[in-house]
Amino acid sequence: MEKKNATRKDIALRAGTTVSVVSRALNNSGYVAKEKKERILRVAEELNYVPNPVAISLQKRRTKQVLFYCKNLDNAFNIQLYQGMMDAAADRGYMVLFNGKIAFEEIKNTLVDGILMQDQSIAKVYMDIAGRNYHLPVVSAAYSDSINISQPLPIVDIDMFKVVETALDYLWKNGHRRIALGMPYPYDSPHARTIAYKSWTHEKGVENPRDYYIGVTRQNPILKDDERLMHFREEMAESSIIVPEDFFGKGQLAAHIFVEKRLDATAILGFNDDFSLGLIKGFQELGIHVPENVSVMGIDGINSRKYISPMLSTVALFPEKQGAKCVEVLLDIIEGKKFKYVNHSGFKLIEAESVRKIHRF
């Protein structure tokens, strides 16, 4: 006669508790007192209870799986971040699952040992919605943005203030004194890159830096107080131009806005490499030569920048290394090793063809 598999009810009866408490302990969701949880896991092993789909998770107290929440699948940086996560996890016998829908309510049905976050803004939403009920360790990539999260969690941060400063100093060193900034956020945004740009232009004594800021947002990518753009806005309304969702498309639109505003900037720094590659494409569509007419600088160092002409100058953030570090910290937490709450990932200036040197006399 075939042996019947143990059920959670069997575990509850032997452990002297309820099925709901057993479920919380086995799913690692909700609070269960430490001693009670250890007793439930011990009984589960004694009964050879095997949950689906991970057959040995109870024996080792782990699923050997972690989950990466990422909402921007069209951002090459995040794909390289994920690649670094997968490689680092494989080195330690783990697998990294991927969720591109940010469906936090589904975490209760997912067998994982910990969670990786694309950035702190997503981490905040998770902690506010689900983090209080599901006590899984969380580690987030971070980019120096000031975000108030309800519970402290470890981060792997890239100092975006120094990154932006490095990019702007490089352009300044090459003779550029009027430098625009292209962003997918408005000028009053608390985003680290916007704040860094404001601080740098103030330190350099740049007049009217707001005039050189191109914020391509869904609400209004054009500055309302610029009379020279009245005709352009009317054209946009008549043709129902929609602000693209992807960074490349936003960069293309930013190039058109740059020209319509008749900016006298000799260089523009894009939000990231995808945005900056879109700038190059947009300028080329308008017959504006890069870098002869305007220089373009990026931030990221993604692989695809090598296949666009001219090759993009950028500040490389090495997403694979950042992703690997996120995994290392998370697995150290899972395996009970020492870890730091604030970890750092480096960057490096990469010179290429999209920035020209202006001779100043």
Image: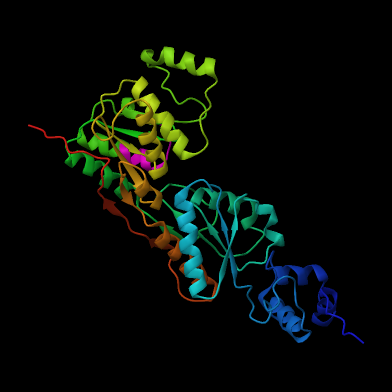
- Between 115 and 25, the residue placed more toward the observer is 115
Q: Quadrant of residue 107?
A: bottom right
Relative depth, front residue between 324 and 195 = 324
**Where 87 falls versus 355 (above or below)?**
below
- What predominant SS class does the magenta segment belong to? helix
Residue at image coords 84%, 80%? 5
- Residue 348 lies, with reference to residue 60, above or below; the image says above
118 relative to 205 in the view: left or right: right
Q: Quadrant of residue 80?
A: bottom left
**Residue 213 on image: x %, y %:** 35, 30
Q: Relative to the observer, which residue lies in front, 43 or 179?
A: 179
Q: Is residue 190 magenta?
A: yes
Q: Is residue 34 left or right of residue 249?
A: right
Q: Is residue 215 visible?
A: no
Check the picture and name the quadrant holding the C terminus: top left
Q: Residue at x 75, y 73 (%)?
A: 51
Name the spot of residue 6 as percent of width and height, x first.
83, 79
Residue 218, position as x, y percentages in the image:
52, 29
Q: What span is colored magenta in the figure?
A: 188-197
Looking at this rendering, what residue extends furthest in the right direction? 1
The one nearer the camera, 10 or 275, is 275
Color theme of the render:
rainbow
Task: Look at the image and tell me in which quarter the N terminus lies.
Answer: bottom right
Q: Residue at x 41, y 57 (%)?
A: 319
Residue 339 is left or right of residue 286, and the answer is right
Asked if residue 145 lies left or right of residue 23, the reply is left
- Residue 76 among magenta residues: no
Farthest left residue in view: 361
Q: Is residue 337 visible?
A: yes
Quick check: 218 above or below 53?
Answer: above
Q: Which x, y percent locates residue 53?
A: 72, 70
